[in-house]
Amino acid sequence: MNLIRIEPIDKNNWEEALSISLLENQVNLVPTVIESLAYAYIKPWDEAFDPYILCQGDKTFGFFYLSYTPNSTENYWVGGFQIDKEYQGMRLGTQSLKRILEFIQDIHRQCEVISLTIEKSNDHARKLYEKLGFVNQDKENQDGEIIYKLKLK
């Protein structure tokens, strides 16, 4: 089994990132890669916004971004997490999320809490995040998505 690699999106791989697509019933659950790249440029929520692709071998199969305040302990948000429709059902979601959590702890050692939001209708994502320890905060963001948090320390 090849390890999952996380690579920052740059001038060499942005087209691979844009090739990621979802099933029709999933497109309204997460921002598109192109929207996320626009967020990375504009930084609408935090001081830093880093988009990444998920790779295994020579295949790019997923995407996520990390929005955060540098050097904070609690303002780290995973967003836009998606697995290309051709690679769904292969347990890559669970493996990728575990890898993303390790990655964040490696590059942001001071991070103590990772947050994310889930569309109310996205039961699949809710089950995945809860399985890995994320806790429903019983709060919604401005878009009506449910806020989840994972305490690391």
Image: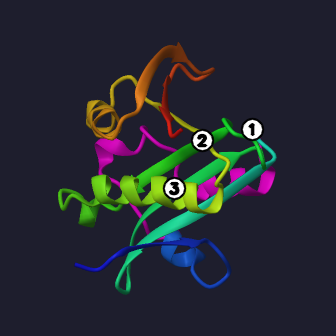
What kind of residue is marked 3? Phe
What kind of residue is marked 1? Trp
What kind of residue is marked 2? Trp
- Disc number lying in front (2 or 3): 2
Left or right for 100, reference 98: right
Residue 123 horizontal/vertical position (percent): 27, 30
The tag earlier along the polypeptide, 3 or 1, is: 1
Q: How many numbered discs?
A: 3
Find out whether residue 44 is within the magenta segment.
yes
The front one of 107 and 45 is 107
Q: Residue furthest front?
A: 153
Q: Which residue is mark 1?
A: 45
Circle 2 SS class: strand
Residue shown at 68% from the left, 81% from the top:
11
For the residues labelled 1 and 2, say whether their Cβ atoms are less than 8 Å apart.
yes
Residue shown at 64% from the left, 54% from the top:
109
Provide the residue span drawn in magenta.
18-45
Residue 27 horizontal/vertical position (percent): 40, 45
Between the residue at mark 3 and the residue at mark 1, the CA separation in whole angstroms equals 16 Å
143 vs 13: above or below? above
The quarter of the displayed image where residue 128 is located: top left
Find out whether residue 146 is within the magenta segment.
no
The front one of 112 and 1 is 112
Q: Which residue is mark 2?
A: 77
